[in-house]
């Protein structure tokens, strides 16, 4: 008979042991907040041209069609 003092804790560890996979180590690594939410840096000084839906545009020698403009 098994008595669990924490019936809702460490279920993944019990499952892993039951499947014969051995003990489970926590899969946590320390991260910096800057790595999670990096700042967006825009180094482009050129102006973006105005376009309408369906307009074909030539970008870097490749024809691109604007399907839909999202605001």
Image (cartoon, rainbow, N blue to C red):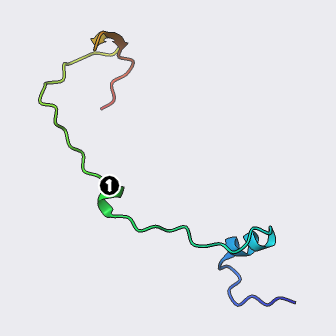
- Front-most of residues 32 and 46: 32
At which x and y percent is residue 27? 55, 67
Examine the rendered structure and indicate whether residue 3 appears above or below residue 59.
below
**Relative to 52, 4 lies left or right:** right
Residue 48 falls in which quadrant of the image? top left
Judged from this view, the residue extending furthest toward the left is 45
Res 54 seen here: no
User: In which quadrant will I find the C terminus?
Assistant: top left
Residue displayed at 38% across by 64% down = 31
Q: How many marks?
A: 1
* Residue found at the far right of this picture: 1
Q: Secondary structure at mark 1?
A: loop
Using the rendered image of the protein, determine whether residue 15 is visible from the camera's viewpoint: yes
Among the 4 quarters of the image, the one containing residue 57: top left
Residue 54 spot, x, y in % from top left: 35, 12
Q: Is residue 1 above or below residue 9?
A: below
Quarter occupied by residue 43 = top left
Q: Residues within 10 Å of mark 1 (few under 14, many from 20)?
A: few
Q: Residue at x 20, y 43 (%)?
A: 41
| Quarter occupied by the N terminus | bottom right
Q: Please tell me which residue is depicted at 76% across the width and 73% down the height of the picture.
A: 17
Give whichever of 47, 32 is nearer the camera: 32
**Disc 1 designates what residue?**
37
Q: Residue at x 83, y 88 (%)?
A: 2
């Amino acid at each position: 008979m098994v008595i669990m003092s924490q019936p809702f804790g460490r279920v993944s560890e019990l499952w892993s042991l039951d499947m014969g996979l051995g003990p489970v180590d926590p899969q946590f690594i320390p991260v910096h907040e800057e790595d999670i939410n990096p700042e967006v840096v825009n180094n482009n000084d050129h102006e973006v041209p105005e376009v309408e839906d369906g307009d074909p545009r030539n970008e870097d020698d490749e024809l691109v069609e604007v399907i839909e403009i999202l605001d």
